[in-house]
């Protein structure tokens, strides 16, 4: 299975979501999830961001590609994205959202 995650940036802020379901229930993490059959990875990450946070983001590039077999994911792709529009509201499997002010290095 292929999964995707996104660092969503707006200025010097980036977005985290608090997981409402396993794996890692209660942990703060970047929005993301599984790629659906027939869906491109770029469409998947835009969908996951919208489902979990209520905002639209634009894909800038790929940050990392790794394997997480312990979570049942064969490949996990992390994208850098930038905020486009929308109000941040938790939805789907995100219990809360939080803007963290800082600079991504």
Image: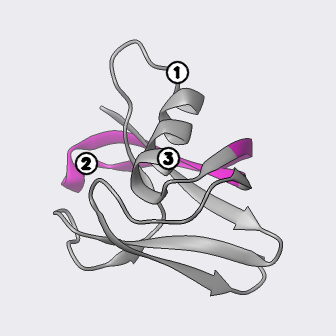
Q: Residues within 10 Å of mark 1 (few under 14, many from 20)?
A: few
Of badges 1 and 2, the one in the foreground is: 1
Image point 40% across, 55% down: which residue?
52
Q: Residues within 10 Å of mark 2 (few under 14, many from 20)?
A: few
Q: Position of residue 49 (x, y in %)?
A: 50, 50
Q: Check disc 3 and report the residue beneath it.
A: 50
Q: Upstream in the sequence, badge 3 or badge 1?
A: 1
Side (left or right) of 57 relative to 12: left
Distance CA(mark 2)–CA(mark 3) = 26 Å
Image point 54% across, 65% down: which residue?
88
Q: Say which quarter of the image contains residue 15.
A: bottom right
Do the CB atoms of the residues marked 1 and 2 lie less than 8 Å apart?
no
Q: Upstream in the sequence, badge 1 or badge 2?
A: 1
Q: Position of residue 18 (x, y in %)?
A: 35, 75
Q: Check disc 2 and report the residue beneath it.
A: 69
Instruction: Look at the picture and state if 27 lies above or below 10.
Output: below
For the record, the magenta segment spans 58-81
For the residue labelled by badge 3, is the local secondary structure a helix, a strand or a loop?
helix
For the residue labelled by badge 1, is the local secondary structure a helix, a strand or a loop?
loop
Image point 70% across, 52% down: which residue?
85
């Amino acid at each position: 299975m292929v999964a995707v995650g996104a660092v969503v940036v707006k200025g010097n802020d980036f977005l985290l979501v608090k997981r409402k379901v396993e794996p890692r229930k209660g942990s703060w993490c970047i929005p993301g999830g599984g790629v659906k059959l027939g869906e491109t990875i770029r469409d998947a990450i835009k969908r996951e961001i919208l489902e979990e946070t209520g905002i639209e983001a634009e894909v800038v590039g790929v940050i990392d590609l790794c394997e997480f077999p312990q979570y049942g994911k064969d490949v996990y792709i992390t994208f850098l994205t930038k905020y486009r529009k929308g109000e941040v509201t938790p939805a789907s499997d995100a219990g809360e959202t939080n803007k963290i002010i800082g600079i991504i290095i």
